[in-house]
Image (tube, grey):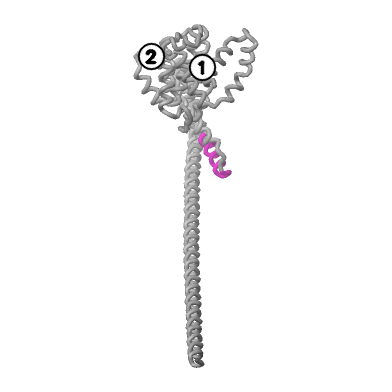
């Protein structure tokens, strides 16, 4: 029987010779289905052995892989297939690891450690421009995500060059920034979800009213600021005009008087408009306070209703408990009554049996006496 790891090596070798033979084309077309037929845990163990036998991990001499008769090019292609296959198996398991229910081959810390120690030394022999560097990098990222604590514990037993290389591949700082962004996005999404949650009609209406009033308050505030700016501009304009006129000239004096009257009218209109805006602001403030009072009243009413419901539930639970205790007590009394009746019945039967036995003894005694008398 051909071991699974040897079978995998032969299949990957034939699949790497694309277009060279009809057999390799057949293997390539059937490879996805073949991978599905193998048990993932058994395949992980076999792929682990493949790395050892191929000597790619640096944990075994190259002469072991040479015993297979592979050229360096064939060996690189097989290792590429092994790394790719490992990624295809481990990728779906990342979701399991996220929910802390990882099982199977890699759930055992010893298996995880062996596989990690197989692939880390490969960084010494696989260069960044090599075809195998990409699947190796992806595999390192996957292994780190599966069990970060154990992976880093194993990693820090290696030399500084490998640690730095893995750090650059895994990107711990990038993951931290990405995690912070994900948290911010989740908080923002949560706020949006809360805002989009279906609300009671009255509550939604109150919220719309509150938003409308806030908008009106902002509008009033903007109008007041614009009015103050207009007043300042007009004041500056009038002052400029006054500086242009000569007060000794009668015509200029008349024009100054007209300007003063116009200034007075503008000031009165602005004061009136400002008073109207102030009245609007006060009314909006009163409406806002009233709305807050109504909301507090509604919240108080909801709390009271909730408290009443809780009290009603407690009463119902108490009544149910009392009813249950009563039923238990009735069952116990009924059981005692049945036991008493059975006991009385047994005693009566025992008395009847004893009476019959006594009668039989008496009859037997009389019979013996008669027999003796006859003799």
Residue 331 seen in the current view? yes
Does the magenta portion include 77?
A: no
Counting from the top left corner in percent of width and height, residue 64 is at: 44, 12
Q: Is residue 300 above or below residue 331?
A: above
Badge 1 or badge 2: first in the primary sequence: 1
Q: CA distance from mark 1 to mark 2?
A: 21 Å
Q: Is residue 157 above or below residue 366?
A: above
Residue highlighted by disc 2: 162
Q: Is residue 29 left or right of residue 300?
A: right
Counting from the top left corner in percent of width and height, residue 189 is at: 51, 31
262 or 164, nearer to the observer: 164
Q: Based on the displayed image, in which of its 4 quarters is residue 162 positioned? A: top left
Q: Based on the displayed image, in which of its 4 quarters is residue 201 positioned? A: top right
Q: Is residue 238 left or right of residue 200?
A: left
59 or 126, nearer to the observer: 59
Residue highlighted by disc 1: 82
Which residue ends up furthest to the front in the rendered image? 375
Counting from the top left corner in percent of width and height, residue 338 is at: 50, 71
Q: Is residue 371 above or below residue 219?
A: below
Secondary structure category for the residue under label 1: helix
Which circle, 1 or 2, is nearer the viewer?
1
Tag shown at residue 359? none
Which residue ends up furthest to the bottom in the rendered image? 373
Q: Main secondary structure of the magenta part?
A: helix
x 50%, y 42%: residue = 287
175 or 2, nearer to the observer: 2
x 48%, y 87%: residue = 365
Residue 267 seen in the current view? no
Q: Based on the displayed image, in which of its 4 quarters is residue 242 positioned? A: top left
Magenta highlight range = 200-214
**Dots 1 and 2: beta carbons under 8 Å?**
no
């Amino acid at each position: 029987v051909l071991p699974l790891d040897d079978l995998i090596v032969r299949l990957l070798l034939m699949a790497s010779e694309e277009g060279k033979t009809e057999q390799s084309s057949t293997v390539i077309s059937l490879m996805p289905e073949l991978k599905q037929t193998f048990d993932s845990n058994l395949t992980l163990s076999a792929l682990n052995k493949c790395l050892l036998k191929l000597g790619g991990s640096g944990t075994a001499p190259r002469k072991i892989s040479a015993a297979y008769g592979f050229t360096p090019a064939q060996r690189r292609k097989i290792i590429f297939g092994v790394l790719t296959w490992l990624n295809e198996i481990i990728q779906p398991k990342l979701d399991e690891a996220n929910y802390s229910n990882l099982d199977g081959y890699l759930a055992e810390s010893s298996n995880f450690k062996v596989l990690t120690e197989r692939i880390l030394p490969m960084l010494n022999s696989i260069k960044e421009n090599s075809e195998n560097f990409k699947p190796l990098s992806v595999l390192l990222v996957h292994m780190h995500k599966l069990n970060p604590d154990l992976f880093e514990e194993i990693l820090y037993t290696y030399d500084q060059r490998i640690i730095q290389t893995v750090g650059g591949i895994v990107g711990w700082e990038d993951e931290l920034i990405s995690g912070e962004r994900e948290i911010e996005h989740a908080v923002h999404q949560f706020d949006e979800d809360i805002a989009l949650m279906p609300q009671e009609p009255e509550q939604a209406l109150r919220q719309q009213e509150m938003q409308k009033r806030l908008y009106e308050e902002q509008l009033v505030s903007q109008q007041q600021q614009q009015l103050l700016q207009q007043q300042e501009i007009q004041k500056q304009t009038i002052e400029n005009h006054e500086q242009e006129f000569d007060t000794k000239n009668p015509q200029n004096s008349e024009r100054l008087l007209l300007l003063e009257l116009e200034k007075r009218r503008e000031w009165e209109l602005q004061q009136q408009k400002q008073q109207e805006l102030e009245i609007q602001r006060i009314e909006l403030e009163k409406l806002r306070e009233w709305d807050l009072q109504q909301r507090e009243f509604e919240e108080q009413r909801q709390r009271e209703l909730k408290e009443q419901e809780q009290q009603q539930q407690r009463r119902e639970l108490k009544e149910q408990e009392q009813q249950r205790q009563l039923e238990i007590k009735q069952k116990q009394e009924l059981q005692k009554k049945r036991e008493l009746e059975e006991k009385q019945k047994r005693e009566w039967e025992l008395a009847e049996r004893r009476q019959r036995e006594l009668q039989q003894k008496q009859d037997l005694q009389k019979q013996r006496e008669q027999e003796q008398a006859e003799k």
